[in-house]
Amino acid sequence: MRKTNLMKASVIPGYGDADSFELIQLPVPDVKAGEVLIRVAYAGINPADWKYREGLLAQHVNIQFPGVLGNDVSGVVVEVGEGVTRFTPGDKVFAFTNISKGGLGAYAEYTAVDEDRIALVPEEVSLKSAAVIPTAALTSWQNLLRKDRGNLQAGQKVLINGGSGGLGSYAVQFAKWAGAEVAATCGSSNQDYVQSLGADLVIDYRKQNISGELAKWALEGVDIILDTVGTKSLPDALSMIKKGGRLVSIPTMDADMDDDVAGDIAEAASLGISKIFDFCTLETCGKDFSLIISLLAEGKITDPMIETFSIDEVCDAHKKQEEGHVQGKLVLEIAGETIT
């Protein structure tokens, strides 16, 4: 059971820059039917977080001010709402928070989350490792493997554009686990890291011509491109994909990078290529989380690089995430591994 009715939270009083965060006391959220109250161990940080903070996603997500950000959370169950059957107090869990539907995020001591967005953390996996899974791993998993998106098959060749970030770090590993041959782009300083994840071909986008290097590796073109960076970073993407292949692009919510989505889809179709432009599906995402974390527990994938910040350092963490080119993932430590 909870031990207090108040909690420490890092909040934004309104839309603003990274220095706008304030550390305040808020009421511990009530637990509604179908929800689970989680005492937070770690909160994962994603590019979406700074876009929430600046109001760039206001048309998609309704932040209630003072706003508690954070899609990704791990921790321990302290209460369950009416109708919850899969979790009990004391369970170690991780989840995609209810921020996407107007609820609290993870930058606080407690958060309440829908049961179907949660999965158990096995003993073999740390709470820190679990906290960085939800957004990046779920997006990679669904967009590579779902039949209506990448539908990646063993033996296919795939290019991961942006192999060193959080999403890319998981995507390279999921593609190798699925039996694909994997090429990935990254900067010079990240080449060894991306190769360590299992990439068969690593292309330095700053020094090498991506399409030229890819053509040597996949003479007929690749089966799939998973673009985690933005359409304009691969202006000749369609020329790299074989007929019948797929270009799966993750929305950046930046019009300058996402470009003309409808036009891109039509152009791809004229070439016999499917262009999919999607993020991730949250309904019953807990099932996908259980599969993903089992791969981690069994050693079939490994953690991305993880850099840890305290809740007092959230401003610094956001500034680093907003600058881009983060290797792996950033995480806020709230209660940490010793949570009870």
Image (tube, rainbow, N blue to C red):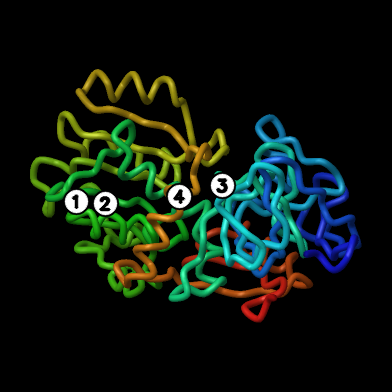
User: Residue at position x 19%, y 51% from top?
Assistant: 214
Q: Is residue 95 left or right of residue 313?
A: left
Disc 1 and disc 4 in contact, CB within 8 angstroms: no
Q: CA distance from mark 1 to mark 4?
A: 27 Å
Identify the mark nearer the N-term, 3 or 2. Answer: 3
Residue 218 image position (x, y, % from top left): 12, 48
Classify 10 Å Cα crowding around label 4: few (below 14), some (14-19), many (20 and above): many
Q: CA distance from mark 2 to mark 4?
A: 26 Å
Q: CA distance from mark 3 to mark 2?
A: 37 Å
Tell us which disc is closer to us: 3 or 2. 3
As helix, strand or loop, the secondary structure at mark 4 comes to helix
User: Residue at position x 15%, y 30% from top?
Assistant: 243
As helix, strand or loop, the secondary structure at mark 1 comes to helix
Identify the mark nearer the N-term, 4 or 3. Answer: 3
Q: Which residue is mark 4?
A: 138
**Marking on residue 214:** 1
Q: Which residue is mark 3?
A: 117
Disc 2 and disc 1 in contact, CB within 8 angstroms: yes
Indicate the amino acid at tag 4: Leu
Q: Which residue is mark 2?
A: 210
As helix, strand or loop, the secondary structure at mark 3 comes to helix
